[in-house]
Every structure is written in structure tokens, then in C-alpha cells.
Image: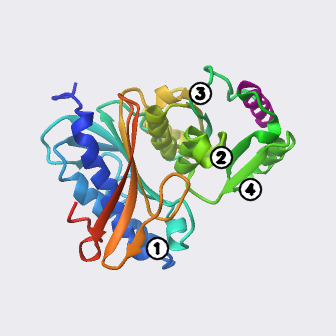
């Protein structure tokens, strides 16, 4: 049991500083063509800021296994070692390719909850399905075909399937899915990377124009996205996808015993969490980093599931102090 209560209200601003620092550190690599340097800069800054927080934190969704990631690996302990015991899921730079190429929707993303509040998802694929808030439970399901999901959602919204837009990662594995969606006359918004942002889009349809997300991507990103939907509202269903016995072994190591289980949003994130994401490049969720004479300006979305609050914060930081986020 946690040694102290998870004080989400007091920790939320600190979490925003963590995502802001990572975004500012990666700013110098936007459009420079170096994915690894951009990612490493974000990792370093995020780790430094996390270690300033009064928490006993454990990274449960991170950069990979301990031997494969120099920092912020799964199982790494962060924080001062004082305060509540918390689990942390993070992606220091979701969209390293997007950052390197200066393409939309690169984000720094982090969520935090009480110890034991998040699925320890193995590094395998996950089939994901998400819609925004305001619908009866199970309005769409994993058992439905892509076209049936579109028809069901259109019926629930009281609109034609022509008025539905589905967000899908642009991958060869999704060709049949895309064809099925388009057979209903629905639109498909293809994204090159960043399915955390893609799923968040569903929760703000009026802002983004996205009604539903479907397709397979990384399982760790699925937990991060579920954290966002836990705060914003909406439904999410997910199922782990295994390509070989090695991946099943990873799942067993992470504590997964039922390989056919369909997870809901509240299975992926079982308790109240806080979530922060800062824009690196411009996107539909948050604005990217803006360079002004002498300053960098960031936009961060900060959310708490306990209250359902969603804050958008603009932060202007002197250029000379931005790369490491020291002035935060």
C-alpha cells in the first residue's frame, strides 16, 4: 500500500513541468533529421525534472527494458524518494520522426497514478478502439467489423456514416481496415505516427474532427492513451497482439496471463491519474513550440481524472534557459 495518499492536485503542476522540460529540450532538434538526438534530449530533461518531485516513483511504461534504454527504463525509480508511491507511464517524445522532420503532432507525454494503478503493458502490439464521451457503454466493440463500428457510432450520434471520421495509423497492416471504413462512406484521417494523440483526438471531436480511433500500435502507448481518456471521458477497448512466442514471453514477464483478454479503459488504468502532454510540433491537441525573440513558448494540456478538469497552459521561457527547463 502507498505510504502516503496520492495527492494528485499538488503533483499536477509538477507533472506539467516535467512534460514542458522534455518538450523544450527537444526543441533544438525540430527539423534537424536526428531522431535519436531529439529523443535523448527529451529523456534527459524528463528524468531530471521527475527526480525533483516529492514522490517514490516507479516507471511502469517507459523507454524499454533496463538493458536496452539508457534512461527512464521500465522499473526505474524516480523522484526524491519521499512522498507517495506512484506509478508513471511516459513517452518523453511521442513522435521522434515527426520531430526530426518537423511534422505535426509530436508530443511529450506523461501520466501518473497511485502504485498499482496501470497495466504493466509489455512492448508488443495492441489492437485499439476508442470513442469520445457521451455514448452508452459498448456503443462500439472489438467484436464488430470496422464498417459495423462506423454504422453503430453514426446511429448513436444521429448522423449519416458520411459524417463520421476515423483516425488510423498509416500502415500497410491497416489497408483492409481502411477499405472497410471507407466502404461506409466515412472519412479516414491517416496519421504517420503518434497514436496517443490519435486517441486523444476522439475525446475532443468538436476541436479535432475525429469521431473514432481504431487500429494496432504499441501496447505501452495504449496505457498512456487510456490515462488521457480516463481524464477526458470516452471509451477504449484494447487487446494485446502477439506475433511470436518471444512476445508472449514478454507478456508473461509483465504479469499477463490471459492472452485473449479485451481490456477496457478502466482495466488499463484502474485508479485516478493525472496526465500532461506538451506540444513539440503543432498539432490538433496542443500547439507546438513557438520561437520568439529571446523566448520559447509551449502549450501543455494538464488533466486530472478525479475532477475531470482539463487545463491548457501557455508557458513562455527564456531561450538561454530552455533546453534543460531549468527555470521551471
Magenta part of the chain: 146-156
Q: Quadrant of the N terminus?
A: top left
- Count of all numbered marks drawn on residues in the image: 4
* Disc 3 from disc 4: Cα separation: 24 Å
Quadrant location of residue 20? bottom left
Q: Residue at x 45, y 32 (%)?
A: 230
Rate crowding at label 2 as few (under 14), some (14 to 19) or many (20 or more) other CA atoms within 10 Å. some
Q: Which residue lies furthest to the left in this view?
A: 82
* Residue occupied by mark 4: 172
Placement of 223 over or under 48, stated as above or below: above
**Alpha carbon distance from label 1 to label 3:** 37 Å
> Is residue 61 in sight in this rendering?
no
Q: Are marks 4 and 2 in contact (CB under 8 Å)?
A: no
Q: Mark 3 points at which residue?
A: 262
Please tell me in which quadrant of the rendered image residue 192 appears.
Answer: bottom right
Name the secondary structure under disc 1.
loop
Q: Which residue is denoted by mark 1 in the rendering?
A: 30
Q: What element carries label 3?
A: loop
**Image coordinates for residue 96, horizontal then vertical, percent:** 49, 65
Name the element at disc 4: helix
The alpha-carbon separation of the residues under discs 3 and 2 comes to 27 Å
- Residue 209 bears which disc, if any? 2
From the image, state whether disc 4 or disc 2 is nearer to you.
Answer: 2
Q: Earlier in the sequence, mark 3 or mark 2?
A: 2
Amino acid at each position: 500500500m502507498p505510504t502516503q495518499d496520492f495527492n494528485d492536485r499538488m503533483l499536477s503542476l509538477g507533472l506539467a513541468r516535467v512534460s514542458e522540460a522534455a518538450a523544450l529540450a527537444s526543441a533544438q532538434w525540430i527539423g534537424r533529421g536526428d531522431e535519436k538526438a531529439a529523443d535523448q534530449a527529451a529523456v534527459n530533461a524528463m528524468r531530471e525534472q521527475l527526480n525533483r518531485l516529492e514522490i517514490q516513483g516507479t516507471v511502469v511504461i517507459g523507454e524499454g527494458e533496463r538493458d536496452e534504454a539508457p534512461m527512464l527504463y521500465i522499473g526505474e525509480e524516480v523522484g526524491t524518494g519521499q512522498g507517495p508511491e506512484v506509478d508513471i507511464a511516459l513517452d518523453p517524445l511521442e513522435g521522434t520522426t515527426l520531430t526530426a522532420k518537423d511534422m505535426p503532432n509530436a508530443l511529450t507525454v506523461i501520466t501518473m497514478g497511485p502504485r498499482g494503478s496501470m497495466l504493466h503493458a509489455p512492448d508488443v502490439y495492441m489492437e485499439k478502439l476508442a470513442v469520445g464521451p457521451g455514448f452508452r457503454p459498448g456503443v462500439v466493440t472489438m467484436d464488430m467489423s470496422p464498417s459495423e463500428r462506423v454504422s453503430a457510432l453514426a446511429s448513436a450520434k444521429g448522423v449519416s456514416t458520411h459524417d463520421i471520421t476515423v483516425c488510423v495509423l498509416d500502415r500497410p497492416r491497416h489497408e483492409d481496415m481502411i477499405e472497410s471504413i471507407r466502404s461506409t462512406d466515412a472519412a479516414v484521417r491517416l496519421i504517420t505516427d503518434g497514436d496517443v494523440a490519435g486517441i486523444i483526438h476522439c475525446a475532443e471531436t468538436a476541436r479535432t474532427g475525429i469521431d473514432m480511433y481504431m487500429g494496432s500500435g504499441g501496447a505501452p502507448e495504449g496505457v498512456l492513451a487510456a490515462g488521457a481518456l480516463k481524464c477526458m471521458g470516452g471509451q477504449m477497448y484494447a487487446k494485446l497482439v502477439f506475433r511470436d512466442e518471444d512476445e508472449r514471453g514478454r507478456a508473461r514477464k509483465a504479469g499477463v496471463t490471459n492472452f485473449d483478454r479485451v481490456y477496457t479503459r478502466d482495466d488499463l488504468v484502474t485508479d485516478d491519474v493525472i496526465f500532461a502532454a506538451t506540444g513539440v510540433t503543432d498539432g490538433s491537441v496542443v500547439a507546438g513550440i513557438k520561437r520568439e525573440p529571446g523566448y520559447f513558448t509551449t502549450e501543455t494540456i494538464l488533466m486530472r481524472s478525479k475532477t475531470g478538469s482539463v487545463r491548457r497552459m501557455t508557458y513562455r521561457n527564456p531561450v538561454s534557459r530552455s533546453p534543460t527547463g531549468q527555470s521551471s
